[in-house]
């Protein structure tokens, strides 16, 4: 099955797994350098010696998308990438699909970073995960194949793709602004989704043709 995946989707999954493996070997350095941190100056992660500091860097808008907060987080994103990304890759081709995915990762990171900057003196948190890219892919899939039947994991209810995306958009907006479910990058989800829809409307709708 793995060998039959479209090559770009397979390569992205391999990169996600490799990055997660590196996280297990060097958790603090990987988090410090490649997680997405708020722009509040140096943040002490380990007292050392030597001490390890994290701080915001521009490349983190992209690199955070290849780190994950746990195996379950990785598996959910990987499954969604396989289910929806492989279809889009077959329509668009590998290079366009990877570019689209990475742009959505950046868009999700930008919204999360911009809307969750902590007030001075308060605890900071790091943003991890490919969810921005995944939500962008899901948004494009729903626009391209709005009547395709998809299913929520919890609860397992089948529905058309457009409805699933609408539910995710509303939930991410409400949960992001209310803070009802902390510890999840809701604005990264929403930012990735909006980025994916915008890129699709402006450019990607002219990429390729859906399979017969």
Image (spheres, helix red, strand yellow):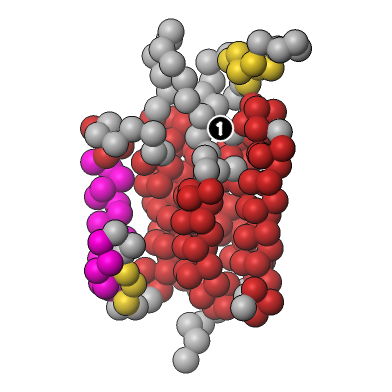
Which quadrant of the view contains residue 115? top left
Q: Is residue 187 above or below residue 130?
A: above
Residue 4 in percent (x, y) is at: 65, 80
Q: Out of 201 and 195, give the one closest to the viewer.
A: 195
Q: Is residue 105 above or below residue 35?
A: below
Whether the magenta-drawn stretch holds residue 159 is answered as: yes
* Residue at (70, 51) in percent of width and height: 18
Q: SS class of the residue under badge 1? A: loop
Which quadrant of the view contains residue 112? top left
Most common SS among magenta residues = helix
Q: Out of 5 and 206, give the one closest to the viewer.
A: 5
Q: Out of 199 and 143, give the one closest to the viewer.
A: 143
Q: Is residue 105 above or below residue 28?
A: below
Mark 1 Cα within 10 Å, few/some/many (few <14, many 20+)? many
Q: Is residue 212 visible?
A: yes
Residue lying at the far bottom in this picture: please name it. 212
* Residue at (34, 78) in percent of width and height: 148
Residue 185 in percent (x, y) is at: 41, 39
Query: Which residue was labeled with disc 1?
Result: 36
* Residue at (43, 55) in percent of width and height: 135
* Residue at (53, 15) in percent of width and height: 40
Is 96 left, or right, of 167 in this rendering? right
Whether the magenta-drawn stretch holds residue 34 is answered as: no
Q: Is residue 119 above or below residue 109?
A: above
Residue 85 in percent (x, y) is at: 52, 67
Residue lying at the far right in this picture: please name it. 50
Is 53 left, or right, of 39 in this rendering? right
Instruction: Count numbered badges in the picture.
Output: 1
Residue 194 in percent (x, y) is at: 39, 51
Quarter of the picture containing the N terminus is bottom right
Q: Out of 58 and 30, give the one closest to the viewer.
A: 30
Which stretch appears magenta? 155-174
């Amino acid at each position: 099955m793995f060998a039959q995946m479209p090559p770009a989707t397979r390569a992205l999954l391999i990169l996600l797994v490799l990055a997660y493996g590196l996280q297990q070997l060097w958790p603090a350095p990987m988090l410090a350098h490649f997680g997405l941190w708020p722009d509040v100056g140096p943040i002490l992660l380990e007292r050392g010696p030597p001490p390890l500091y994290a701080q915001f860097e521009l490349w983190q808008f992209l690199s955070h998308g290849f780190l994950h907060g746990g195996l379950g987080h990785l598996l959910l994103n990987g499954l969604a990438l396989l289910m929806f990304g492989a279809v889009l890759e077959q329509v668009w081709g590998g290079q366009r699909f990877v570019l689209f995915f990475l742009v959505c990762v950046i868009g999700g990171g930008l919204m999360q970073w911009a809307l969750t900057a902590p007030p001075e003196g308060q605890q900071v948190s790091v943003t991890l995960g490919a969810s921005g890219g995944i939500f962008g892919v899901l948004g494009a899939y729903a626009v391209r194949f709005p009547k395709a039947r998809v299913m929520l994991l919890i609860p397992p209810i089948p529905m058309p793709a457009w409805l699933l995306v609408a539910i995710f958009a509303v939930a991410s907006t409400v949960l992001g602004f209310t803070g009802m479910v902390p510890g999840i990058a809701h604005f990264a989800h929403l930012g990735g989704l909006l980025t994916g829809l915008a890129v699709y409307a402006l450019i990607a709708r002219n990429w390729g043709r859906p399979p017969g």
